[in-house]
Each structure stands twice: as C-alpha cells, then as structure tokens.
Image (tube, rainbow, N blue to C red):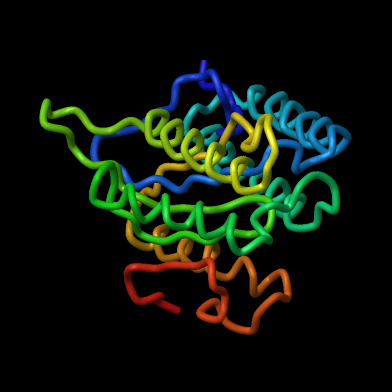
Amino acid sequence: MLEFQLSYRRHLPHIQPPGATLFVTFRLAGSLPQSVLEQLLAESCAAARRLNKIADLRERAKLAAIAQKQQFDRWDKALDNSPAGPHWLRRPEIARIVADSLHYLDGERYDLDCYCLMSNHGHVVFTPLEKADGAFYSLSSIMHSFKRYTAWQANLTLGRQGQFWQHESYDHIVRDEAELNRIRRYVLNNPVRAGLVETWEEWPWSFCRSSLQT
C-alpha cells in the first residue's frame, strides 16, 4: 500500500536516487513550540487518512505530492513566524560558521546549488557526489557531518552546551529543471517574503551558483 507521510524524518530511511539533486531544510533545536508541532502532526495524519482511502495508486501519489508541498509550506511558514526558541543564526558570527561549512563541503561531498540561512532555519539545494567506490555520499552522512561540525563550532562561539540542531530535517528530491528553478526562487526569496530585504541579493546569507530564472 502506498501510504502518505511527510518527508521530514529522523530514523526512517531516506530515498536517494544516485545523482539526484536534493532540497533540504534544517532547523535549530526548539525552534517550533510543541503546540505547533502537534498541530502540524495532526494535519499530516488527517491528510494521510484521506489519501489512504483513495484506491487509485496513481491518483493517490499525485495528491500525496500536493499534500506534502502544502504541509511543508505550513511548516516553513511556522518557522518564519515563530517567536519561540533560539534564533542563533541571526548572529553574523554563527551564520558565518554555517555558511562556511556549506561551502567547505562543496566539491567534497556535493555540488552546491543554492542556500539561504534564516534566523532559526536554513534551506539548501545540492547534488551528492560519487565516491571512489562508485557509491554516492548519502544525505544522512552529509547532514550528520554538517550538523556535528557546525553545532560544535556554534556552541563554542556561544559559550553554551547542548543540542544545537533539531535532529530531523525535511528533504525533497528535485524532479527536473523546472522544479529546480521553482525551488531556487523559493529558497532565495525567503528573506524577501519575511520583509527583511527587497531583493534576495541583499541578503548576506544567501548563495546561488546559477543565474536565477524568473
């Protein structure tokens, strides 16, 4: 049975076709209140119940993709509007640690396409590289390395201990060039939608390797 589930997860296996470009969203630990998380979970479960009643698997898959996008949009909007939890990435020295790490892994573990760092979360698009043994770097190994190093450096800078990043991330496989361009616009215009800048180029914690197509 094809069952709907939202793609931000911690322990479930991540589907990663070889050579696929990935859109990943990561956030600070405690960046969403428990009440918001419970509401999002309830909405996800309600969507799953509706979708799993659809007998036509092709139609179910089509509607599941729409539901996932809608759920992600609500999740991301909640992060943008969340007054709760830490906003460590608002501090330039912390954002610099994270941005430098994203660039450091570029050409080592992935080809970096674009990213944007907000005060309590970040979006990144990359394509994992092939290793000498013919396998590709896994998303889980990339994010583990990235989160471990940046958490250590950020906590050292902040003079604190404890969990820095939320364990789970949201990930999405980019299907084609048209979707890639839509995701680039979504990622880079995050601070524009939040009213922080007028154009994405003004935001100091954004990067895009290619020209952004309008």
- Residue 210 visible here: yes
> Residue at horizontal 53%, vertical 66%?
205
Q: Residue at x 50, y 52 (%)?
A: 98
Q: Residue furthest top?
A: 1
Query: Quick check: 133 above or below 143?
Result: above
Q: Residue 30, how many percent across, how many down?
A: 76, 37
Image quadrant in which you'd find residue 164 = top right
Between residue 97 and residue 36, name the one nearer to us.
Answer: 97
Name which residue lies at 42% across and 58% down: 179
- Image quadrant holding the C terminus, namely bottom left
Count of marks, rendered view: 0
Q: Give how far across and how far down residue 208 sits, in percent.
A: 40, 68
The answer to whether residue 67 is above or below residue 190 is above
Position above or below: 9 against 31: above
Residue 68 seen anywhere in this rendered image of the structure: no
Which of 30/135 is in front?
30
Residue sticking out furthest to the right:
35
Asked where in the image residue 113 lies, by quadrant, the reply is bottom left
Q: Residue furthest bottom?
A: 198
Pick the front one: 69 or 20: 20
Residue 45: percent from left, percent from top: 74, 26
Residue 92: x, y in percent? 61, 64
Q: Is residue 138 left or right of residue 79?
A: left
